[in-house]
């Protein structure tokens, strides 16, 4: 394969000087992108660097203020995604847009159904989907229900949807974010098939190792503009990361153990059922978190981790089992009492459980601490003290925002997360339940949050870390449990385990169990 | 400056909405063949003599007091995302029972008043409490149950009025409860009016105005400044976040509905204690539903509700003079309806604008030229990573990356199917 910048190679997509402004913000500036036909072209950049804005421009979701889009050398202009689809551009979104109670066939044809006499022509659709599935080795059964499919299969349905509409250029937005390593390899296999058939793939990611594995060429975006292109075969992940961040990177290295004897959380035989008397979504979990210990929970999402966290926080009733915080039995305690008793909580979905988006930052400082100083004075909210303490958190935890009266919605994901972490740390909890603490957070903030967790651990805080980021789990945890179908199926030593081994345990493959439990 | 702008925006939205609504109403009046200018003149015509003018003001204020209380009752529940449509039934049943209790006992003045008011609040709270208990224990939507309880309340009130609590003689054209003795009358405020140098009006200005003011301030403080109010608002903004923060959602539903119902119980008090002295078949109806409109108009803030109540009361007063001018009184209803619609739309637009501004407000500083190596294509080889701008340390890096204003949320909103 030839080297990028070969002017004679046909360009499937070319962007020249794309600039997109939103009121008060330049989201993209002078973007230059050259994607050759039949290659996998990766676009890397941190969250908030402007990748999504750029892809929305290319997919016709909004129009650029300046610059040109060229497809196969011809200028193109899209007024809506429909125009982009008609021009052969398809998008596979990060969050799947599938109807669970429909079959693969129904999902794929949804919106462009082949009809015969006014009715859905299932036979024609089935043939077409089989044909697509066979020629790109997607392995889809048109008649299976989407709700029965695993994450990897769902993604292939999304890809089939795009191919069904005749796309020749596919945009994949962070496609590996939801996959375990084995599924990632399968996806890369599919991408190779697409490439062999002459299709062009634009692959958006910030996972640099994967990008280097799959891409033929790479464009790096930083702060809304393209900072350069790189050849994946000759550029190291570290070099790429430095292009992305524009600075030397901090590393999340492990350090000596700070685990003490005293347990802060003991769970014994904890079970949680989805509905009363129903199937167990958390199945007989027994674990201990000690002072100064980070206990990691690994698992494919949907294997009971969220329910486990809810059970610890008192947000879901236990079907069986016992919870102890220190020496006290907290099984019957309310969420508020648990929080007062010294459990801090960094929720998985900060917009749903961690913040009041429309409220100012100082009110978000009060959230979860409504009964404790400095936020309250007796029956009343102490607004002045809450504001002052919010300002302190913003200073100490590097939350970038104009001030305590700014609405939370105005902050970037990383800054919102730092505020949440700072807020929870400020109450000096004995136990911190951190679910995906660095999800959707840029590299700089991620490093900051890791540092905070490490410092808290060194001071003797017990931390329960649930994460989908295997590197994060391995580098931060002192003990690592793997959760599969609600049960803890393996306990691993994070100093020895590799992400691949961990992935094997997560899918059950390591136990000779080959079905993925994405319930 | 942002606070000032936000305030400006929040005031401008209802102002524009009212203007649009008035323009629409003018068009309607013109369509039915009347002169809108005449209608406006009639509405603002408070009479010629000073006594007539103060009388008009008293009528507006006396109407505004129950509307204000109704708006407050609705807003407390609204603040945590509960739709208490049952205010109508709550105040009707509360008023008839309070009237019955007031007529049945003889107590020294203040105690007598206190008893009547406490009975009204307790009954209102009880009636709203049924809705809360149904919601918390059985998951019944409060909208459905409170609407249905309205019918039960109205039927029950009629039964009580015509049956056990009837005080009027057999065959009277208006059925009433027994009148409340004078110790249970709420003193009027006409002394204050004349003290201010205004002419003595024909009707008495309700003394309950003062109580309503105190309740308004109490609700404002409760919602804005207390722990309870914080929990309430947090639940309204995000039930999931509130629950995760330790708010007991079920208990909050119960408390909010009890408070809402207790305030609803007060709605009938100004008329009962200030003028009617008994509950009767002609007793003011519909205040509970108007309260929903007033709460919407006032964006659930006590001050806004006060303005909304005054506006509605002003329009209501105009109904009779309009008829004298041969303009149908339903013009008033049309104006009120269009105002509510326009305000709701304007508030929603204002909310979205504020939110969008907030989302973009502190976003990325525009990429400054020369901060990095723009366009420095790395070529085929194994050259070093491109030049790093000397000023971009890790520390500042975090700040500049302050999101380019399009986090994941926007994606889902624009989820055009591929």
Image (cartoon, coloured by chain):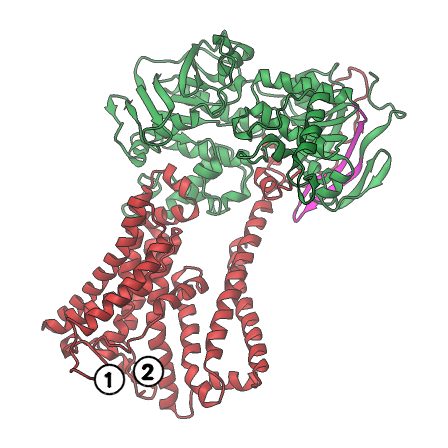
Residue A356 at x, y percent in the picture: 45, 43
- Who's green, chain-wise? A
Residue A499 vs residue A259, the one in the foreground: A499
Find residue B173 and name its label: 1
Q: Residue B392: where, in percent of width, then height? A: 65, 29
Residue A21 painted magenta:
yes
Identify the image quadrant of residue A434: top left
Which portion, as a residue range, is magenta? A15-38
Q: Residues within 10 Å of mark 2 (few under 14, many from 20)?
A: few
Residue A48: x and y, percent?
62, 35
Q: Nearer the viewer, mark 2 or mark 1?
A: 1
Same subunit, tags 2 and 1: yes
The secondary structure that most of the magenta stretch takes on is: strand
Q: Secondary structure at mark 1?
A: loop
Which of B115 and A403 lies nearest the eye of the viewer?
Answer: B115
Q: Is residue B64 above or below residue A511?
A: below
Chain that is red in the image: B
Q: Nearer the viewer, residue B210 or A287?
A: A287
Residue A20 badge: none
Marks 2 and 1, Cα distance to the nearest angstrom?
A: 40 Å
Q: Is residue B388 visible?
A: no
Q: Is residue B81 above or below residue A439?
A: below
The N terminus of chain B, quarter of image: bottom right
Which residue, given by chain and number where applicable, does mark 2 sit on? B196
What is the total number of numbered labels drawn onto the structure image?
2
Image quarter of the C terminus of chain B: top right
Identify which residue is drawn at 24% across, 77% down: B280
Question: Left or right of B107: which side holds A365?
Answer: right
For the point 54% across and 76% down, the residue is: B25
Q: Residue furthest front?
A: A117
Residue B237 can be seen, yes or no: yes
Residue found farthest to the top: A496
């Amino acid at each position: 394969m030839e080297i990028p910048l070969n002017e004679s190679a046909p360009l499937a997509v070319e962007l020249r000087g794309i600039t997109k402004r939103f009121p008060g913000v330049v989201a993209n500036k002078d973007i230059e992108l050259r994607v050759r036909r039949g290659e996998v072209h990766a676009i890397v950049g941190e969250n908030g660097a402007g990748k999504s804005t750029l892809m929305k421009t290319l997919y016709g979701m909004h129009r650029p203020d300046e610059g040109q889009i060229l497809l196969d050398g011809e200028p193109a202009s899209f007024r809506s995604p429909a125009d982009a689809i008609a021009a052969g551009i398809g998008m596979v979104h990060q969050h799947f847009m599938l109807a669970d109670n429909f079959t693969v066939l129904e999902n794929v044809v949804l919106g462009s159904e082949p009809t015969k006499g006014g009715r859905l022509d299932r036979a024609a659709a089935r043939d077409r989907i089989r044909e697509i599935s066979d020629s790109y080795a997607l392995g889809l059964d048109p008649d299976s229900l989407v709700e029965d499919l695993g994450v990897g299969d769902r993604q292939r349905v999304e890809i089939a949807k795009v191919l069904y509409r005749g796309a020749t250029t596919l945009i994949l937005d962070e496609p590996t974010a939801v996959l375990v390593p084995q599924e990632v390899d399968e996806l890369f296999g599919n991408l190779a098939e697409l490439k062999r058939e002459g299709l062009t793939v634009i692959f958006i990611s910030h996972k640099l190792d994967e990008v280097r594995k799959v891409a033929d060429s790479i464009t790096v975006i930083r702060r809304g503009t393209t900072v350069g292109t790189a050849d994946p075969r000759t550029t190291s992940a570290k070099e790429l990361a430095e292009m992305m961040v524009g600075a030397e990177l901090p590393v999340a290295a492990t350090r000596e153990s700070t685990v003490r004897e005293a347990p802060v959380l003991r769970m014994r035989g904890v079970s949680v059922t989805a509905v009363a008397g129903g199937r167990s979504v958390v199945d007989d979990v027994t674990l201990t978190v000690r002072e100064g210990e980070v206990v990691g929970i690994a698992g494919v999402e949907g294997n009971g981790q969220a329910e486990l966290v809810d059970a610890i926080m008192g947000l879901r009733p236990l079907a069986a089992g016992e919870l102890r915080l220190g020496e006290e039995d907290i099984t019957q305690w309310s969420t508020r009492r648990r929080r007062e008793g010294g459990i801090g909580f960094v929720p998985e979905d900060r917009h749903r459980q961690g913040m009041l988006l429309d409220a100012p930052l100082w009110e978000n400082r009060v959230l979860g601490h409504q009964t404790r100083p400095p936020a309250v004075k007796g029956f009343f909210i102490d607004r002045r003290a809450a504001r002052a303490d919010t300002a302190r958190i913003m200073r100490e935890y590097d939350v970038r925002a104009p001030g305590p009266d700014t609405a939370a919605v105005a902050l970037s994901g990383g800054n919102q997360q730092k505020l949440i972490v700072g807020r929870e740390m400020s109450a000096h909890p004995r136990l911190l339940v951190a679910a995906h603490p660095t999800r959707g957070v840029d590299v700089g903030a991620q490093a900051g949050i890791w540092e905070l967790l490490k410092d808290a651990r060194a001071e003797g805080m017990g931390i329960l870390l649930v994460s989908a980021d295997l590197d994060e789990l391995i580098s931060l945890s002192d003990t690592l449990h793997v959760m599969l179908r609600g049960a803890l199926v393996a306990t691993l030593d994070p100093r020895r385990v590799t992400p691949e081994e961990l992935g094997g345990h997560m899918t059950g493959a390591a136990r000779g169990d080959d079905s993925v439990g994405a319930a | 400056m942002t606070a000032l702008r936000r305030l400006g925006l929040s005031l401008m939205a209802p102002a524009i909405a009212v203007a649009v609504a008035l323009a629409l109403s003018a068009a309607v009046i013109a369509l039915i063949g009347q002169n809108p200018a005449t209608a406006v003149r009639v509405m603002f015509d408070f009479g010629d003599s000073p006594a007539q003018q103060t009388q008009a003001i008293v009528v507006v204020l006396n109407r505004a007091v129950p509307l204000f209380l109704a708006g407050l009752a609705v807003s407390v529940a609204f603040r945590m995302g509960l739709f208490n449509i049952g205010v109508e039934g709550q105040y009707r049943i509360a008023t008839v029972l309070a009237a019955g209790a007031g007529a049945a006992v003889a107590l020294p003045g203040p105690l007598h008043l206190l008893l009547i008011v406490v009975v009204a609040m307790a009954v209102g709270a009880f009636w709203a409490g049924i809705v809360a208990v149904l919601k918390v224990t059985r998951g019944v939507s409060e909208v459905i149950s409170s609407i249905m309880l309205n019918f039960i309340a109205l039927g029950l009130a009629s039964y009580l009025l015509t049956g056990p609590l009837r005080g009027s003689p057999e065959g009277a054209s208006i059925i009433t409860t027994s009148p409340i003795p004078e110790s249970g009358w709420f003193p009027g405020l006409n002394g204050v009016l004349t003290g201010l140098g205004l002419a003595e009006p024909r009707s008495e200005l309700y003394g309950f105005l003062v109580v309503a003011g105190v309740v308004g301030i109490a609700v404002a403080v409760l919602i804005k400044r207390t722990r309870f109010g914080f929990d309430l608002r947090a639940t309204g903004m995000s039930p999931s976040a509130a629950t995760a923060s330790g708010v007991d959602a079920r208990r909050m539903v119960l408390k909010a509905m009890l408070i809402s119902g207790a305030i609803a119980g007060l709605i009938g008090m100004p008329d009962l204690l200030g003028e009617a002295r008994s509950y009767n078949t002609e007793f003011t109806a519909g205040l509970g539903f108007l309260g929903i409109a007033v709460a919407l108009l006032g964006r659930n803030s006590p001050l806004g509700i006060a303005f909304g109540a005054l506006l509605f009361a002003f329009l209501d007063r105009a109904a009779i003079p309009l008829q004298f001018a041969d303009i149908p009184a339903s013009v008033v209803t049309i104006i009120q309806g269009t105002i509510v619609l326009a305000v709701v739309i304007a508030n929603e637009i204002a909310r979205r604008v504020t939110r969008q501004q907030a989302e973009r407000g502190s976003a990325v500083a525009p990429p400054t030229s020369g901060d990095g190596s723009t366009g420095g294509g790395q070529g085929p080889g194994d050259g070093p990573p491109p030049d790093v701008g000397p000023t971009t340390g890790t520390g500042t890096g975090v700040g500049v990356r302050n999101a380019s204003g399009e986090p994941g949320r926007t994606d889902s909103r624009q989820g055009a199917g591929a």
